Image (cartoon, rainbow, N blue to C red):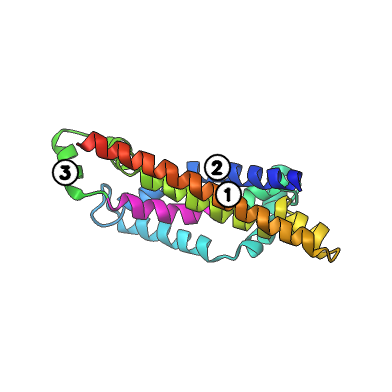
Amino acid sequence: MINALFETIYMSFISLLLSWVIAMPLGSIVSETRPGGLFPNRIINFILNRIVDLGRSIPFILLVVFLFPFTRMLIGTAIGTKAMVVPLTICAIPFEIRLIEEILSEVPYSIIEAAKIDGASNLKIIIRIKWACKTPYLVNALGITLINIIGYSAMAGVVGGGGLGNYAIVYGFQRFNWNIIAQSVVLVVLLVSTIQIINNILVRILLRRILCVRH
């Protein structure tokens, strides 16, 4: 069970890291190509939004099966803990892009205008102002995404994905051992609750620092 717990943590955090590295610039592009953004472009914005909507509409289990050939090509196998990082990452990217887009679009226009008057480039406005200004909310989005990934990783156990989900299926459901299933559920709940508590603390600390800087 402890090994399954660490497999879940491994899958979830690696997938979060990889997906966020991809989603952060893409989410910024979607936000800035909207009308009123720094690089308004209806065509690019429309295409990216349809891709994001498509990615979010595919059920995770179907995505895992659909990606079997691609995962096998990258990892060498389509099942197991390492293999599940691929569909978990791909599944998380559209979700994160939408969160990032909404967060960055809430930056007050007056701040952007002031930065332009000071001669800041668009890239500097995105990184040094928008990302910095919304850091607490981006961190909160990271926590939300991580919790969702943990839920998906448990579902991945149905197709041999490893982790607590696979442990509950193999040692619990298939052997009619409901104690194992209950223990797996409790561990997932404790893991999610711990992450949520830590995330809330980090967000409060960052919000206080931003308030102090503004004052």
Cβ atoms at labels 2 and 1 below 8 Å apart: yes
Q: CA distance from mark 2 to mark 1?
A: 6 Å
Q: Note whether 171 is above or below 205 in the view shown.
A: below
Q: Nearer the viewer, residue 78 or 139?
A: 139
Q: Quadrant of the C terminus?
A: top left
Q: Note whether 63 is above or below 207 in the view shown.
A: below
Q: Residue furthest right?
A: 175
Report the residue at 41% width, 54% height from top. Answer: 99
* Circle 3: residue type: Glu
Q: Earlier in the sequence, mark 3 or mark 1?
A: 1
Magenta portion: prevailing SS class: helix
Q: Position of residue 21 (x, y in %)?
A: 49, 41
For the question of whether residue 115 can be seen, the reply is: yes
Q: Residues within 10 Å of mark 2 (few under 14, many from 20)?
A: some
Q: Residues within 10 Å of mark 1 (few under 14, many from 20)?
A: many
The boundaries of the magenta stretch are: 89-106
Q: Residues within 10 Å of mark 3 (few under 14, many from 20)?
A: few
Q: Name the mark on residue 89.
A: 1
Report the residue at 37% width, 61% height from top. Answer: 46
Residue identified by numbered label 3: 113
Name the secondary structure under disc 2: helix
For the question of whether residue 23 can be seen, the reply is: no
Residue identified by numbered label 2: 18
Q: Nearer the viewer, residue 109 or 68?
A: 109
Left or right of residue 14: residue 68:
right
